[in-house]
Image (spheres, rainbow, N blue to C red):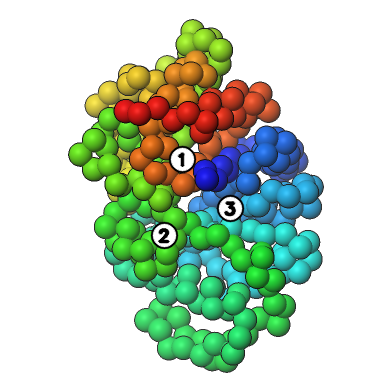
Amino acid sequence: MLTVYTTAPSSDGVSGSEFRRLALDAARWTEAAGYRGLLVYTDNTLVDPWQVAQLMIEHTESIVPLVAVQPLFRHPFDVARAVSSLGFQYGRQVDLNLVTGGFARHMHELGDTLDHDERYLRLVEYSRIVGRLLAGGPALTQRGEFYDLSTARLTIPLPGDLTPRTYLSGSSEACIEAARVLDAVRLFYPQFIGDYAQAPDVLRGNGIRLGIIARESTEQAWQVARGRFPDDQLGEQLHDLAAGAVESRWHRKLSAEAQRSSEPREGYWLYPFRAYKTFCPYLVGSYQEVAQMFGRYLQLGISALILDVPHDEDDLHHAGLALRLAERAPLVS
């Protein structure tokens, strides 16, 4: 069964009160649409994702925040304590999206000198510590490659039914191996579905992040899409500057593809990414067209979908119509 999350808005460029309103709107729309929860992402420039998660929990009944966890920001004991504290206070679950950091400048600011593959090794050790602490049992003592603990134990136990689902972001070989070791669902930004013809198993069991703009007709969908993401030369220039400073391999690969051509391919559209307005591809078209395109990803075995930040509640309504069509009758490619 497909698990669907949306994405919380960014705190960049808005006031605190405006961000709270946007975040709560997205959370309430997500809950009303019946999706599991929202991805709350993180980097050096954004508000703390755990505070956003608590805000959303306090103002909703059931959504599950999918909190981005970067080892440089919190010790694994503190992450385990945050999960158990939210479970203790609210009886609510959070999921974890393990990330290594993408911008070289941000890692330099924090003195992180590990190379790409070493950061995934650290992430594996980090995740195992969080999992063992949340599982309860004997106090944890270990001397690891990255973390040492001596008789560490959570005094606030987490009920088993609130155990987080674990996701891992990336597409490199190091990420694939880390996800295998942790038995975590890997999240990445998908290529055009036709590009998987020679590697159909790449998507199986994994999750993808996409924006969806679906309407009754193709023309209506593209009118919305072009209005929301008009041509933006400054955005393209900012994207190219940022792409040069990114260590993330998925970002570099998608950037190269977008720079070659961001024209739609059967409704798969990279221009919002190319114009630096978002970090994922879009599917654009009528309900039936989007259902057909997305159904092909379903056929290749994806298990989770992260929808882009909703523009308004109608966005999720229209996307939901297309997704339900795809789930009921995914088409044979």
Contact, CB < 8 Å: mark 1 with mark 3? no
> Is 122 located above or below residue 174 in the figure?
below
Locate residue 198, reporting x and y percent. Answer: 20, 39
Residue beneath disc 1? 209
> Is 79 located above or below residue 242 in the figure?
below
Contact, CB < 8 Å: mark 2 with mark 3? no
> Is 200 located above or below residue 145 in the figure?
above
State which tag comes first along the sequence, 2 or 3.
Answer: 3
* Residue at the top extreme, as displayed: 219
Locate residue 9, reporting x and y percent. Answer: 61, 39
262 horizontally vs 90: left or right? left
Binning the other alpha carbons within 10 Å of mark 1 as few (below 14), some (14 to 19) or many (20 upward) gives many
Front-most of residues 114 and 301: 301
Residue at image point 54% right, 87% down: 140
Locate residue 229, reporting x and y percent. Answer: 48, 20
276 horizontally vs 114: left or right? right
Instruction: Name which quarter of the figure residue 99 lies in.
Output: bottom left
229 horizontally vs 193: left or right? right
Residue beneath disc 2? 100
Judge whether residue 99 can be spotted in this image. Answer: no
From mark 2 to mark 3, how far is it between C-alphas? 16 Å
Type of the residue with mark 2: Thr
At mark 2, the secondary structure is: loop
From mark 1 to mark 3, how far is it between C-alphas? 13 Å
Q: Nearer the viewer, mark 2 or mark 3?
A: 3
Residue beneath disc 3? 66
Residue at image point 53% right, 52% down: 42
Mark number for residue 290? none
Instruction: Name which quarter of the figure residue 330 lies in.
Output: top left
